[in-house]
Image (cartoon, grey):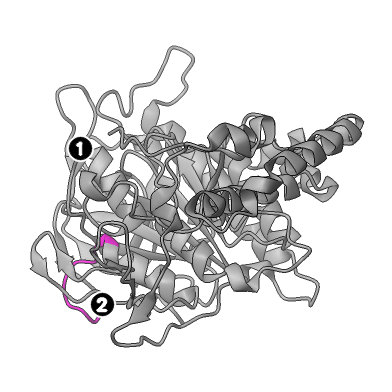
Amino acid sequence: MNTNVPKLTRRDLLRAGGLTVAGYSLLPMLQPLNVAAKEKAKPRGGAEVCIYIFLQGGAAQMDTFDAKEAPETPEDFDIRKIKQGLSMPVGTMPMLSERTDKFAVVRSNEAWVSEHGQATYYVQTGRMFSPARIHEIPSVGSVIAYEKLDQRKDTDFLPPFISMDMDPDFQVGCGMLPPACAPLNWDSHMAPPFLLPESERDEFEIRRQLLSEIDHQWREEETHRGRIFSDIEEYYRSAYRLSDPKAAPIFDISPEEHKRYGKSYVGKACAMARNVIEADAGAKFIFINHSSWDIHSWAFEKGPDGAGGHQYNVNRQLDAALANLLDDLEERTDENGRPLIEKTFVMVVGDFGRTPGLNANGGRDHHPYAGVTVFAGAGVQGGKIIGATDEIAEKIIDPGWHKERSVYPDDVLVTLYSVMGVDWTKKITQTPSGRAFEYIEHLSPKGPMQFGEISEIFA
């Protein structure tokens, strides 16, 4: 799904400056915001930052965190009962199988849709895609960034919302919210384009000063055009802060670290996310995209060298990346001696689940009726298992939480807002379309529904 969201990167601004984007479609983001809450919620709080790992394509629940023995299951997946109610594919997820006390698993997830574009949009926004509001609806990462803007310190040089390895066509931006809430996107396997070599700093400063002088007259105008340039300048300043020399080490992952995290894109992204948390330089929401979970064919087929098929690869990549991330966040501390995991909310979410049994091509198809989500950190009770499916992981037989129904993406987002200390009942009433933007809507594809925090995952 190409949502045609305008893409205005910090690199664009650093290279061209404000004058080149005078006609850019930023008008929806410049409307005054009127934020209100009909019924004030009581967020749990406890997390200062979230790492959101998205399994793009939809994880097969029966091959990962809701492992089931089936005729198609390869013997070397080595599915074992780890403890009462939880089995894991030890052969492909050995590290996580030894760390089940560090995360909670929700196995009663259900998705509203089974098409990738719509499902990917939904898990980022908590609503169905609407072409009429494409420039208006922000992602949950941008909403959290917006809620945390007043907490930024003068020394912060990282943007509040960082996104790694997400296809720009699927990334939801800041919508009507200020440009400072937009995601900073980059590929983890490439050198960050915003890092400035010291040898170029003097020349860069001269050009930046010249640009500032040229744009001054536009920014000073008390007109709509002046407000556009003021907002663009703020976006430009956020890009400039990224040239801080302290930023370079955050994105410099040694070969040894990369190997430990699995020598994959998601491994490198998770190692960078750990560094971002440790730097404590303003980032509040880190979105990591782990692709290649849409395995419609040859899930378990092995090559002539004995290497595993697609399901083997993604399982092993996530295993090394997530296990080492949790270990490091637990072992490393902030300046007050507090383990980083205590202030970091980690969540692993997919589009939807996959079908039991293999199709004619040896893969699994889309299945919205059962799926898994993993949570860790910030008060999550490690080892907690919520919900259960039948013997082939096709249907939910026990929701396992107080709502006594399936857990929907909206409930997952309520949980995220709550642990981040955000009142999810808020809404922005003055929008470009005239329709209020609710942080969490209560009109689901099945009609009105009250969504809530999955409180059972917390200690």
> Residue 299, how many percent across, how many down?
31, 29
> Residue 175, how many percent across, how many down?
40, 52
Query: Does 355 appear above or below 157?
Result: above
Which residue corresponds to the image point at 73% horizontal and 45% vertical from the top-left? 240
Q: Which residues are magenta?
A: 402-409
Q: Is residue 195 left or right of residue 179?
A: right
> Residue 202, how many percent across, how many down?
91, 35
Q: Quadrant of residue 243?
A: top right
Residue of label 1: 71
Residue 269: within the magenta?
no
Q: Is residue 140 left or right of residue 319?
A: left
**Mark carried by residue 322:** none
Residue of label 2: 401
Along the line of sight, the residue nearer the viewer: 290 or 385: 290
Which residue corresponds to the image point at 36% horizontal and 53% vertical from the top-left? 124
Along the line of sight, the residue nearer the viewer: 372 or 226: 226
Residue 403: within the magenta?
yes
Secondary structure mostly taken by the magenta-highlighted segment of the chain = loop
> Residue 312, how many percent across, how many down?
42, 33
Tag 2 and tag 1, C-beta contact below 8 Å:
no
Which residue corresponds to the image point at 40% horizontal and 79% vertical from the top-left? 423
Q: Check the picture and name the quadrant holding the N terminus.
A: top left
Q: Is residue 7 left or right of residue 243?
A: left
Q: Secondary structure at mark 2?
A: loop
Q: Secondary structure at mark 1?
A: loop
Amino acid of disc 1: Pro
Q: Is residue 98 visible?
A: yes
Which residue corresponds to the image point at 48% horizontal and 53% vertical from the top-left? 224
CA–CA distance in space, label 2 to label 1: 31 Å
Amino acid of disc 2: Trp
Along the line of sight, the residue nearer the viewer: 422 or 102: 422
